[in-house]
Image (spheres, rainbow, N blue to C red):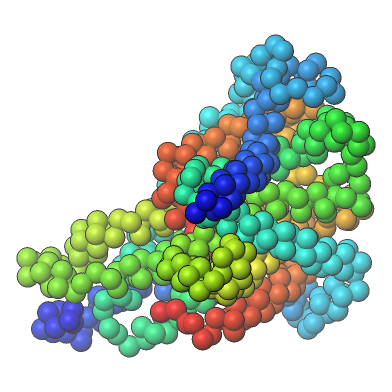
């Protein structure tokens, strides 16, 4: 023991040193973003390395962002899109996951196989026909077009089905004896009972679609319909020029909502995201 | 059993229940996923141009044309190169971070959170920040390098370093994700294994790692590598916002080429052919993944 105690201490110090260094590297872009967002232009262009501004210009940079693009509108659009997509996904996935988990029928294996297949499908690969479909349906530049490729979430169906299988049949039998119809079972029993799985699905869906760029870039065009990622790309290309202070302020505004939500519910987020990696 | 208590007229009412419950998913799935999958293959065999009234089947001419197109060849090579840069770095970094974080309980949650933050940042906003970080004269990276007397490269503006810069951003954003996957794997290794190894004479942490942790982590490592490759093939945002494929096509990658063919030059058939190539690449990897995990099949 006498020999091991100092070695343990050395190991512990080395661990903290390494993790603090790598942690700093992870945080550096966020720090530089906030630092630049709070500097006036002359300090940004001074080529002199300093993190804290000599004259705080944060509010002016934020004001520039709001004066040149409707940032609040973008954020609101993001909320609407994310909520619409998740509501539709849940409404379609819940009943499907229920019959996959609890009701035996011919073709169940085939249907589940199809779900697993769709799980592997990279969304960008089918974007061109999906665009033609949205165009044919007259949905281009609407929220419905945003939701179109994601209506059927194979991941959501898979996750809920796996969770439903762990719910004992006796619980469903008891509900039937109490006069629950099958739809009441899906939405009034299975939904509340599987809240952990629904939450994980929700976190996955919301983070994916809040940050998403590829598909919205294809289908949305009106300036008043842009989501936050499209908004910042628009601001960078059309308005900001070399006003880096305002550009970093805009980036901070787009990044902040999810990062704050993450800091408030870290464990759930990390579990939810880890599930998406391990989804098959 | 659930089926026991289903109403007496079982088979018909159950068929109705199944149709009502699974119907919407099947219908929308066919229209929005399976249909487009078939359509993208069909389109790749045509000369369809966006908005054109007519098109004709031209067999594999799109693919032959791609094989001879220097832009596409660049794009294909760059995609593989980007993958070769990002996958090893982000896998090793993820594994290293997970092992360090898991080694002791002190500040475990804090470190996990800090290293996970980049995953949560919208890629597009992170791209805007990184572009400024890598600005040759005003960016933090070259300002820091100047402190130690190094004249930094022109990063995103130099064809020699542009793809490397994008890979740097890619590693920054994906190592936290891989770390979480490895942490999930590590927590499933019962501490008894390591204790048993210690009792059996594996005194050094290093020995215990090679004897116990690594063999148990190997499957999850293979898994992380495969999904990292798939994710690296999906590179688009940073290219679109920062480089537009340049300078001198040095950051032209598959999805960006597909996007510009289909939605900027309106050569839909040709864009679809690139989508099919992309699909074939990802499909091959998915098969590799199945093959790797065939004997540990999940349920």
Q: How many marks do you count on the picture?
A: 0
User: Is residue A140 positioned above or below A96 on the image?
Assistant: above
- Residue at x-position 69% and y-position 77%: B280
Q: Is residue A263 visible?
A: yes
Q: Is residue B35 visible?
A: no
Q: Decide if residue A257 is on the left or right side of residue A67.
A: left
Image quadrant in which the N terminus of chain B is located: bottom left
Nearer the observer, B178 or B169: B178
- Residue at x-position 24% and y-position 59%: A193
Q: Decide if residue A241 is on the left or right side of residue A206.
A: right
- Residue at x-position 20% and y-position 58%: A188
User: Is residue B140 positioned above or below B170 on the image?
Assistant: above
Nearer the observer, B111 or B82: B111
Nearer the observer, B127 or B176: B176
Residue lying at the far left in this picture: please name it.
Answer: A178
Q: Decide if residue B239 is on the left or right side of residue A161.
A: right
Residue B55 at x, y = what percent? 74, 73
Residue lying at the far top in this picture: please name it.
Answer: A55
Residue B283 at x, y = what percent? 64, 77
Image quadrant in which the C terminus of chain B is located: bottom left
Nearer the observer, B181 or B100: B100
Residue A85 at x, y = what percent? 45, 53
- Residue at x-position 26% and y-position 76%: A102
Q: Quadrant of residue A34?
A: top right
Q: Quadrant of residue A43?
A: top right
Residue B291 at x, y = what percent? 59, 84
């Amino acid at each position: 023991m006498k020999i091991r105690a100092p070695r343990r201490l050395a190991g512990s110090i080395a661990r903290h040193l390494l993790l603090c260094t790598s942690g700093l590297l992870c945080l550096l872009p966020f720090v530089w973003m906030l630092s630049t967002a709070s500097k006036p232009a002359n300090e940004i262009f001074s080529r002199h390395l300093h993190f804290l501004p000599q004259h705080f210009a944060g509010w002016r940079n934020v004001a520039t962002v709001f004066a040149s693009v409707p940032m609040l509108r973008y954020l609101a659009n993001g909320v609407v899109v994310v909520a619409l997509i998740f509501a539709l996904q849940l409404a379609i996935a819940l009943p499907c996951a229920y019959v996959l988990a609890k009701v035996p029928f011919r073709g169940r294996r085939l249907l589940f196989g199809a779900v697993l297949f769709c799980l592997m499908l990279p969304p960008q690969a089918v974007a061109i026909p999906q665009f033609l479909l949205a165009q044919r349906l007259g949905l281009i530049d609407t929220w419905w077009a945003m939701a179109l490729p994601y209506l059927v979430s194979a991941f959501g169906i898979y996750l809920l089905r796996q969770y439903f299988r762990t719910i004992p049949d006796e619980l469903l039998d008891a509900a039937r004896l109490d006069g629950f119809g099958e739809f009441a079972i899906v939405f009034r029993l299975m939904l509340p009972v599987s809240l952990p799985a629904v939450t994980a699905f929700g976190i996955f869906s919301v983070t994916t679609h809040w940050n998403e760029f590829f598909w919205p870039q294809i289908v949305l065009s009106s300036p008043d319909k842009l989501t936050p990622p499209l908004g910042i790309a628009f601001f960078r290309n059309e308005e900001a020029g070399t006003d880096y202070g305002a550009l970093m302020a805009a980036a901070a505004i787009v990044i902040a909502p999810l990062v704050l939500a993450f800091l408030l519910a870290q464990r759930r987020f990390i579990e939810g995201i880890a599930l998406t990696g391990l989804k098959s | 059993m659930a089926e026991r208590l289903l109403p007496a007229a079982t088979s018909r009412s159950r068929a109705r229940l199944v149709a009502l419950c699974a119907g919407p998913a099947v219908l929308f799935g066919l229209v929005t996923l399976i249909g487009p999958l078939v359509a993208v293959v069909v389109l790749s065999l045509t000369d369809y141009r966006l908005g054109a009234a007519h098109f004709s089947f031209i067999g594999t001419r799109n693919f032959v044309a791609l094989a001879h197109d220097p832009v596409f060849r660049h794009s294909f090579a760059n995609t593989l190169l980007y993958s070769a840069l990002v996958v090893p770095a982000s896998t090793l970094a993820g594994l290293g971070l997970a092992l360090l974080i898991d080694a002791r309980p002190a500040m475990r949650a804090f470190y996990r959170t800090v290293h996970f933050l980049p995953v949560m940042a919208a890629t597009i906003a992170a791209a805007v920040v990184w572009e400024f970080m890598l600005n040759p004269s005003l960016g933090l990276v070259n300002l820091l390098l100047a402190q130690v007397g190094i004249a930094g490269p022109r990063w995103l503006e130099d064809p020699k370093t542009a793809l490397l810069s994008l890979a740097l951003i890619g590693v920054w954003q994906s190592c936290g994700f891989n770390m979480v996957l490895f942490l999930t794997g590590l927590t499933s290794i019962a501490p008894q294994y390591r204790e048993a190894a210690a009792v059996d004479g594996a005194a050094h942490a290093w020995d215990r790692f090679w004897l116990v942790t690594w063999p148990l982590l190997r499957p999850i490592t293979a898994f992380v590598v495969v999904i990292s490759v798939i994710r690296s093939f999906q590179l688009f945002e940073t290219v679109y916002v920062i480089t537009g494929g340049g300078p001198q096509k040095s950051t032209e990658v598959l999805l960006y080429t597909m996007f510009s063919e289909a939605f900027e030059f309106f050569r839909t058939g040709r864009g679809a052919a690139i989508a099919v190539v992309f699909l074939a690449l990802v499909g091959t990897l998915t098969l590799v993944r199945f093959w790797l995990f065939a004997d540990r099949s999940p349920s």
